[in-house]
Amino acid sequence: MLEELSQKLDVVFKRLRGEGRITGANVADTLREIRRVLLNADVNYKVAKDFIDKVQQRALGEQVLQSITPGQLMVKIIHDELVDLLGTKSAELSFSPMPPSVIMVAGLQGSGKTTFAAKLALFLTGQGRHPLLVAADVHRPAAIDQLALLGAQIRVPVFLDRALGAVEIARLGVEHARKSARDVAIVDTAGRLHVDEEMMEEAVAIRTAVDPHEILFVVDAMTGQDAVNTAKAFNDRLNFDGAVLTKMDGDARGGAALSLRATVGKPIKFMGVGEKLDALEKFHPDRIASRILGMGDVVTLVEKVQQQVDEEKAREIETKIRKAQLTLEDFLDQLQQIRSMGPLSQVLGMLPGMHRVPQNANVDEKALGRIEAIIRSMTPDERSRPQILNGSRRKRIAMGSGTTVQDVNRLMKQFEQMQKMMKTLGKRGSFNGMKGLRTAGGF
């Protein structure tokens, strides 16, 4: 996410940190480079100009010029201005005191609107709410079938009626939510390949019929400046409450994220970070600014860990590590917890400094799958006592896991090295950091 923007800004900051002190000349050079980076990232020209002007005004103040670490202070100024540009703080959804709360989802076709509706339903279910999905997109082929399938996957009911028009479906869907004690009705509306009057009129009619408490505009983050233009058109007719950026996991430039709020004046509330239905995150401006500047996003990483890690199991793992009793069964359990947090590249991307890793240095997700397959091909006795793995057993495991004997040998060697390291730490009493290790989910 935003890797290209992060790497280019990092190059600019490296030059600035090499300066002995901050002067008007090197500030001007730095900001000229940052403006170029922003424009290359498809950030709106006016947004980029206003951003540079604000940074320059603060950067030329006495506090920066006399600072012991002017380069670091410049990074802080840019971070603060990025946070302000992105929205200062995360924006919450509005809910009605008298359920059901109605959330209308709008956007162009292909933006990920229907998938987002299901993701939002799953997100709200995790918060203890009971949503209903309303299939009001009657124009796109298979849109109703898609929402029905997604609803079944997350066990959320879907209201649909193939014989009615979109406005009537939306109205009856909200009524059905009220009668069936569903406290949130998420209305999926129709989109087009581009903005047209017929689509807008239908969206306005649905808004009038259901009087939504929240209108969310869904836009593909990878469309860059076009996302801003589309957002303006929708906002002029619908006056939406917040935006949703989908496909952020594939957006290396960041133009839409940096331009949207400043040009439309509406907060970004969610972002899609993957294809899976649980790959939805609240939009936190301060965390995104930190990611852009290569500071990582440890807070979001910790939240993911807390959601996925079993605290009791983590304590058991710590005890076993202390006693050097770790087994391959434990290793498999920890591996599954790590993989449940999402693609490993995304998890690593939340760590500070990871933007400096070359873009072509991809994380081999398949390697984790091979490790899991190897361990699953072992018997329970072999997992608890790997020392009994002789040549014939290793050959059988390789055949059962679709790997080679060399792969099995490599895993066992790595596991033995890890056991030795843990045994050494246990003898030295070097477990002061184990509390943090447990919080992070073991390995």
Image (cartoon, rainbow, N blue to C red):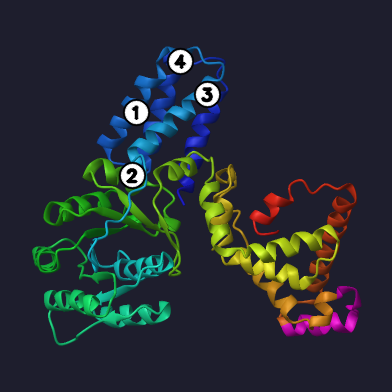
Q: Which residues are magenta?
A: 385-400
**Percent coordinates x, y for residue 243 in the rendering:** 28, 54
Label 2 crowd bin: few (<14), some (14–19), many (20+), radius 10 Å: some
Quadrant that contains the C terminus: bottom right
Three-letter residue code for mark 1: Ile
Tag 2 near tag 4, CB within 8 Å: no
Residue at disc 1, secondary structure: helix
Residue carrying label 4:
63
**Percent coordinates x, y for residue 119 in the rendering:** 38, 68
The residue under the point 74% across, 68% down is 331
Earlier-in-chain disc, 2 versus 3: 2
In the depicted structure, whether residue 108 falls above or below residue 29: below
Three-letter residue code for mark 3: Gly
Distance from Cα at disc 2 to Cα at disc 3: 26 Å
Which residue is more in the foreground, 125 or 106?
A: 125
The residue under the point 46% across, 42% down is 292
Residue carrying label 3:
71
Three-letter residue code for mark 2: Asp
Three-letter residue code for mark 4: Gln
In the depicted structure, whether residue 30 falls above or below residue 206: above
Residue at disc 4, secondary structure: helix
Q: Is residue 45 left or right of residue 320?
A: left
Earlier-in-chain disc, 3 versus 4: 4
Q: Residue 191 — which label?
A: none
